[in-house]
Image (tube, rainbow, N blue to C red):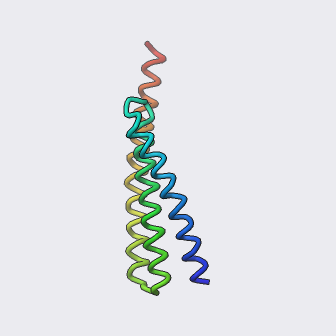
């Protein structure tokens, strides 16, 4: 069971790693677009998910409770931080749209 879970986590890490590369490449290739900052944060978030999934998989395979706990805490803390940044960026975009529609 634990080996299957580790395999699923490695596949998820690959998917999120690919997603991170796509978002980061597009954000850095087209920095002038209005959604480039949100894409950058989404890319960073996907990269964090990939790294955490690999760390969790390693913790499961090597039966290291400390690694699993550290990976879980790291994942939660980083997702919270990037979530707050995304909320701030979305709020800023909504305010800009409101001002553009007024004037």
User: Does 80 sit above or below residue 87?
Assistant: below
Most foreground residue, 5 or 70: 5
Q: Tell me where residue 89 sits by quadrant.
A: top left
Q: Residue furthest bottom?
A: 63
Q: Write the residue at 46% across / 30% down.
A: 94
User: Does 45 sit above or below residue 92?
Assistant: below
Q: Can you give x and y, in whole percent of width and height, for residue 20 in the image?
A: 46, 52
Q: Write the residue at 45% across / 86% down.
A: 62
Q: Tell me where residue 86 sits by quadrant.
A: top left
Q: In this rendering, would 40 be left or right of 10?
A: left
Q: Write the residue at 40% across / 37% down.
A: 29
Q: Write the residue at 45% across / 78% down.
A: 58
Q: Can you give x and y, in whole percent of width and height, for residue 103 in the image?
A: 43, 12
Q: Can you give x and y, in whole percent of width and height, for residue 39 in the image?
A: 45, 42
Most foreground residue, 28 or 73: 28
Most foreground residue, 32 or 29: 29
User: Does 75 sit above or below residue 89?
Assistant: below
Q: Can you give x and y, in whole percent of width and height, for residue 54 in the image?
A: 46, 70
Q: In this rendering, would 8 be left or right of 94?
A: right
Tally of numbered tags: 0
Quadrant where the N terminus sits is bottom right
């Amino acid at each position: 069971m634990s080996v299957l879970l580790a395999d699923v986590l490695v596949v998820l890490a690959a998917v999120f790693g690919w997603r991170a590369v796509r978002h980061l490449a597009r954000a850095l290739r087209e920095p002038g677009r209005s959604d480039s900052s949100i894409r950058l944060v989404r890319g960073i978030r996907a990269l964090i998910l990939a790294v955490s999934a690999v760390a969790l998989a390693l913790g499961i395979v090597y039966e290291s409770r400390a690694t699993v706990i550290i990976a879980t805490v790291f994942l939660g803390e980083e997702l919270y931080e990037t979530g707050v940044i995304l909320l701030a960026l979305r709020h800023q975009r909504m305010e800009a749209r409101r001002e553009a529609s007024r004037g």
